[in-house]
Image: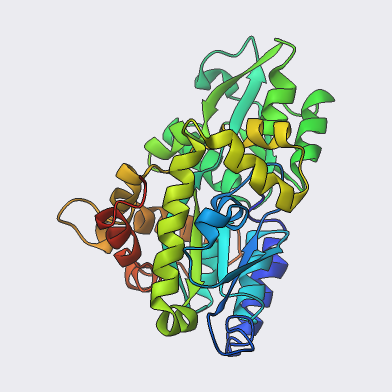
């Protein structure tokens, strides 16, 4: 699964520095003045995200209304900083901390689609079968990431905040290595590392990111677009959202292997690895999509994304990564559910 928040402190500083700069339009418009270039910052890995599924399959890409250009990013924070600087108008697969950091720093961007949850798992020795047995243990995770937000939220729900020591590591591989070396008792890691750690039977997962999301600490990886591009190319944004919804539905259907294989050619991943990695992504399904933006009859302020972003803002403030927690109004100013609403009306999932 894709990284969301390495180097947060430096990244938020970069976003703040860029906040006074206008986004360049050169990355979003074609030199011929025709269809715009649809630049998307994305995470290049064996996990084939919806933006790669769209870009790698002509029947989907051809309906966007512009030429898709995928640019690899190393983290959500870096990707949003590049977006702010005009490198591309879209980012895909970015999680809570980088998005909320961008909101706090005034980046003019809208979240337009909730793509998928993290696929992280809390790996523990087989002898641990309930959360309370973690009291006194040291738990490792990716420092400052969406996973860090999730697992700290879960610990608070279980009354373990002051009973479990959380140690942040610079990479998933470092967390895995520390667990194997016995330096930590539990590891909250993404699916690839979790599968490796649990393959021998001596360890198992005790909770997943998807389960933590249901407790009120969801970390959603989202599609976001600059205000400027959305204002200039509303229909293109709508088309991309529709095709992303369609691509995610395809990835869970009978024709998934062919579409994932085509996407894998773009990132240079072996098809079998891409198929295996992509099929475990916990997608936000089309029938659930709008409920994340707002409840039935409610507003964006009542929605799960806004509430989750407020919790994330407090998490970032507690860690000294933002000075103030964005208000609900600031958060909802960066959410736009209209594209999802139209995609549902257009039955884009089918």
Left or right: residue 317 versus residue 346 is right
Residue 32, percent from left and from top: 61, 89
Residue 164, percent from left and from top: 60, 32
The image quarter containing residue 23 is bottom right
Does any portion of residue 121 appear in the rendered image? yes
Residue 248 versus residue 11 in the image, above or below? above
For image coordinates 18% across by 51% down, the residue present is 296
Left or right: residue 270 versus residue 263 is right
Left or right: residue 335 versus residue 46 is left
Residue 79 versus residue 259 in the image, above or below? below
The image quarter containing residue 192 is top right
For image coordinates 65% across by 46% down, the residue present is 262
- The answer to which of 175 and 51 lies nearer the viewer is 51
Residue 122 versus residue 62 in the image, above or below? above
For image coordinates 78% across by 48% down, the residue present is 268
The image quarter containing residue 178 is top right
- The answer to which of 175 and 80 lies nearer the viewer is 80
- The colour style of the image is rainbow
- The answer to which of 1 and 21 lies nearer the viewer is 1
Residue 153, percent from left and from top: 48, 42
Left or right: residue 283 versus residue 174 is left
């Amino acid at each position: 699964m894709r990284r969301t928040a390495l180097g947060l402190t430096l990244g938020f500083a970069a976003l703040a520095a860029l906040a006074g700069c206008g986004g360049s339009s050169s990355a979003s418009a074609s030199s011929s003045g025709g269809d715009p270039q649809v630049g998307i910052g994305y995470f290049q890995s064996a996990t084939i995200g919806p933006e790669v599924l769209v870009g790698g399959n002509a029947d989907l890409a051809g309906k966007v209304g512009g030429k898709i250009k995928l640019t690899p990013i190393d983290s959500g924070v870096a990707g949003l900083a590049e977006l702010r600087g005009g490198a591309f108008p879209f980012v895909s697969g970015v999680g809570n901390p980088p998005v909320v950091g961008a909101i706090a720093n005034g980046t003019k961007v809208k979240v337009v689609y909730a793509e998928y949850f993290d696929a992280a798992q809390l790996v523990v020795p087989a002898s641990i079968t309930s959360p309370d047995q973690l009291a006194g243990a040291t738990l490792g995770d990716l420092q400052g990431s969406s996973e860090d937000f999730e697992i700290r939220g879960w610990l608070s729900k279980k009354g373990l905040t002051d009973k479990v020591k959380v140690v942040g590591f610079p990479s998933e591989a470092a967390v895995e290595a520390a667990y194997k070396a016995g330096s930590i008792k539990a590891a909250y890691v993404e699916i690839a590392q979790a599968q490796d750690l649990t393959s021998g039977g001596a360890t198992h997962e005790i909770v997943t990111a998807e389960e933590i999301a249901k407790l009120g600490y969801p970390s959603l990886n989202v599609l976001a677009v600059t205000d400027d591009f959305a204002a200039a190319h509303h229909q293109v944004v709508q088309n991309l959202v529709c095709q992303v919804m369609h691509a995610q539905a395809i990835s869970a259907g009978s024709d998934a292997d062919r579409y994932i294989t085509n996407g894998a050619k773009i990132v240079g991943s072996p098809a079998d690895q891409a198929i295996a990695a992509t099929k475990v992504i916990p997608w936000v399904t089309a029938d659930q999509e709008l409920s994340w933006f707002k409840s039935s009859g409610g507003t964006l302020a009542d929605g799960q994304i806004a509430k989750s972003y407020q919790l994330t803002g407090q998490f970032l403030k507690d860690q000294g990564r933002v000075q103030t927690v964005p208000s609900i109004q600031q958060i909802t100013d960066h959410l736009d559910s209209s594209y999802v609403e139209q995609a549902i009306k257009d039955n884009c999932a089918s």
